[in-house]
Image (cartoon, rainbow, N blue to C red):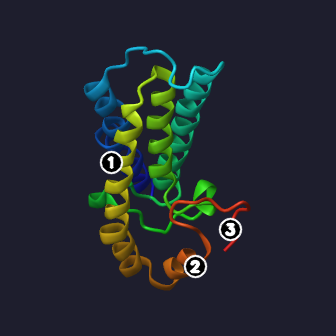
Amino acid sequence: MRGTRTRAILGSFVFFWVAPAVVAGVGPFALFGWMMQPPLLGLPGERVVGAAAVAAGLACLLDCFARFALEGRGTPAPVAQTEVLVASGLYRFVRNPMYVSVLIIISGQALLFGQALMFAYAGVVLVAFHLNVVFYEEPTLRRRFGGSYETYLLHVGRWWPRLTPWRG
């Protein structure tokens, strides 16, 4: 068990830098640079809201990765999936909190740096995430976890969070 957990932690650490760090960090930097432009809406506190969104998205993302490694004894990577279905923490509110967190980070950067086109990038990323979820992840999880995943699907939304945590 200890070796499994250690592999899961290391695998999750590596996957974090391969996937979400690239999509939410390297991608926006490469496409837009992290150069301050005039605020998008010209509202006071707009950049603070953007920075808070980036920080909140990152905190949520790290929590999800920790849950996969510590509770699920696996990683978000398809090559080292979890042994058990993770349905705790943010997963009690929304089925894809990692993807939602990445989108919040990208959108926060758009506000922080005043980069309107970064919202378009977030839209493209959302479409890619949605296609991956519908055509790969959900069918894979149905096969892997069967009835427990079907029950989870019925109670927790794919993209829109519940107001109260699911207690299934």
Q: Which residue occupies 34% across, 40% down?
A: 121
Q: Which residue occupies 52% across, 63% down?
A: 95
User: Which residue does the numbered mark 2 point to in the structure image?
Assistant: 154
Q: Which residue occupies 74% across, 62% down?
A: 164
Disc number placed over residue 143 in the picture, else none: none
Q: Nearer the viewer, residue 96 or 40?
A: 40
At label 1, counting other C-alpha atoms closer than 10 Å, the crowd grade (few under 14, some 14-19, many 20 or more) is: few
Residue 144, how many percent across, how many down? 38, 77
**In the displayed structure image, the side of residue 53 where residue 96 appears, left or right:** left
Residue 56, how many percent across, how many down? 59, 36
User: Which residue does the numbered mark 3 point to in the structure image?
Assistant: 166
The mark nearer the N terminus, 3 or 1, is 1
Q: SS at mark 3? A: loop
Mark nearer the viewer, 1 or 2: 1
Q: Which amino acid type is marked by label 2?
A: Leu
Q: Which amino acid type is marked by label 3?
A: Trp
The quadrant in which residue 157 appears is bottom right
User: Which residue does the numbered mark 1 point to in the structure image?
Assistant: 124
Mark nearer the viewer, 3 or 1: 1
The mark nearer the N terminus, 3 or 2, is 2
Report how far apart the C-alphas of labels 3 and 1 lie in the structure. 30 Å
Q: SS at mark 2? A: helix
* Quadrant showing the N terminus: bottom left
Does 88 sit above or below residue 105? Answer: below
Q: SS at mark 1? A: helix
At label 2, counting other C-alpha atoms closer than 10 Å, the crowd grade (few under 14, some 14-19, many 20 or more) is: few
**In the displayed structure image, the side of residue 160 where residue 4 appears, left or right:** left
Residue 13 makes an appearance in the image: no
Q: Which amino acid type is marked by label 1?
A: Val
